[in-house]
Image (tube, helix red, strand yellow):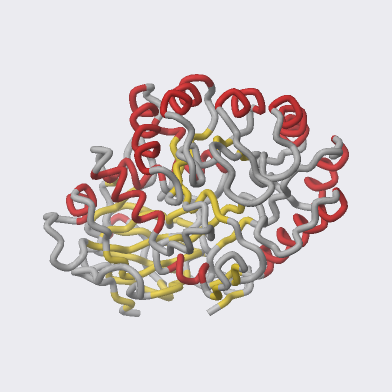
């Protein structure tokens, strides 16, 4: 079901109690000593033990029945076009399907799959502003899509970025998907965008769509974009030596995606961990793409990085939530007071070999999602896409 943004702000108070495991999204303290969260007006207003929280006057009460609660997952790299339709795969309802994979926020890396995508400067700006407005007014399934990410083209000047920012555009599409591919050209435009308050992402690795090009480590470092987009390739990766160079050579966001090279993904995670900079790691899917639409792409990345990457699952959940929120300057992604009330309630999948949720993810299994909440509103119950969870939350009031 598609929902208009802002039309269903939570009325009254939401209480979620009997949470068995509270994942915070914060690397410094990934697991909270709490079993209850309270939201009002779409924001978290109380957090802790049930006896210590003000739960009086609740309009909606959810019994988690011992399930885990995580911040809503954030997909840092998607390519939407309009509404809940992707021409790349001729598919409707893909964003709503991501909701059933626990994704509550998506960030556009450019609306590059639009048939006949304009490449003249006026058209580039018009498409970005239109996409930004459209997704601000229309939220498929309730998912927050941050759309409107122009792909920079030769001939753009500083005033173009000022104009885009004034119109509400906050993102650049992947640098390198348009005619600007040289590091020195990109560096100037990225600086103009940053000065205007627009965050940038650069394509990394081999070409992915017609018109894109090979972007190597030297170009990425020279351009100095805010996010090293799909550092593990989208789809073709740079050599691991160049990935290490990128991790060591700058302090920008390290984005690992589902639609990339898995060996490169695991290597980038290892390099970030060795540098003591896991906070730079964020996760995306880079979809829709030639390999399709992956509603469980973020969950699959969490399971891959936790199991084969030999990392505590609670830390990888942070990469998919709090790290992205802090890097992207979002009001969600963390379970803390004042943050958006975006939650995923989940449990160990039925018949998983893992003894609990985190252990099952460490063993490579996907969790079963029992409920997704966005802005304090229940958006879906038991997921139609994940394996069935052993325990499922219940709305009891």
Q: Residue 181, percent across and down?
A: 70, 35
Q: Please tell me which residue is depicted at 27% across the width and 60% down the height of the picture.
A: 367
Q: Residue 206, percent across and down?
A: 55, 40
- 394 over 163 or under it: above or below: below
- 153 over 332 or under it: above or below: above
State the residue in front, 261 or 124: 261
Q: Please tell me which residue is depicted at 75% across the width and 52% down the height of the picture.
A: 168
Quarter of the image containing the C terminus? bottom left
Residue 6 in sight in this render? no
Q: Residue 191: name its quadrant.
A: top right
Q: Residue 248, percent across and down?
A: 46, 20
Q: Is residue 183 left or right of residue 255?
A: right
Q: Is residue 351 left or right of residue 227?
A: left
- 145 over 260 or under it: above or below: below
Q: Is residue 122 left or right of residue 18?
A: right
Residue 166 in sight in this render? yes
State the residue in front, 228 or 27: 228
Number of labels in the image equals 0
Q: Please tell me which residue is depicted at 43% across the width and 55% down the height of the picture.
A: 73
Q: Please tell me which residue is depicted at 38% across the width and 22% down the height of the picture.
A: 275
Q: Residue 46, percent across and down?
A: 40, 55
């Amino acid at each position: 079901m598609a929902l208009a943004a802002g039309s269903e702000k939570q009325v009254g108070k939401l209480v979620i109690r009997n949470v068995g495991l509270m994942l915070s999204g914060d690397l410094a303290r990934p697991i909270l000593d709490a079993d209850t969260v309270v939201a009002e007006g779409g924001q978290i207003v109380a957090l802790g033990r049930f006896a210590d929280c003000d739960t009086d006057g609740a309009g909606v009460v959810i019994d988690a029945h011992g399930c885990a609660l995580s911040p809503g997952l954030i997909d840092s790299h998607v390519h939407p076009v309009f509404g809940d339709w992707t021409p790349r795969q001729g598919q409707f309802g893909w964003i709503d399907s991501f909701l059933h994979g626990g994704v509550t926020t998506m960030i556009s890396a450019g609306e590059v799959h639009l048939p006949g995508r304009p490449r003249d400067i006026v058209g580039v700006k018009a498409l970005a502003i239109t996409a930004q407005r459209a997704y601000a007014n229309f939220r498929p399934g309730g998912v927050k899509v941050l759309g409107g990410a122009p792909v920079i083209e030769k001939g753009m000047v500083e005033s173009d970025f000022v104009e885009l920012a004034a119109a509400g555009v906050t993102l650049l599409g992947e640098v390198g998907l348009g005619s600007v591919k040289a590091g020195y050209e990109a560096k100037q435009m990225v600086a103009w965008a940053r000065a205007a308050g627009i965050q940038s992402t650069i394509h990394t690795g081999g070409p992915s769509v017609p018109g894109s090009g090979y972007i190597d480590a030297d170009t990425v470092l020279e351009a100095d974009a805010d996010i090293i987009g799909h550092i593990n390739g989208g789809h073709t990766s740079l050599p691991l030596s160049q990935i290490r160079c990128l991790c060591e050579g700058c302090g920008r966001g390290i984005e690992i995606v589902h639609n990339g090279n898995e060996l490169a993904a695991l290597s980038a995670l290892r390099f970030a961990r060795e540098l003591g900079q896991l906070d730079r790691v964020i996760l995306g899917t880079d979809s829709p793409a030639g390999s399709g639409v992956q509603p469980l792409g973020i969950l699959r990345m969490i399971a891959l990085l936790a199991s084969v990457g030999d990392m505590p699952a609670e830390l990888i959940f942070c990469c998919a939530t709090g790290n992205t929120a802090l890097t992207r300057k979002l009001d969600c992604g963390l379970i803390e007071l004042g943050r958006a009330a975006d939650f995923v309630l989940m449990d160990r999948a039925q018949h998983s070999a893992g003894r609990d949720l985190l252990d099952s993810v460490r063993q490579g299994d996907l969790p079963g999602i029992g409920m997704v909440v966005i802005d304090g509103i229940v958006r879906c119950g038991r997921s139609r896409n994940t394996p069935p969870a052993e325990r499922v939350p219940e709305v009891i009031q």
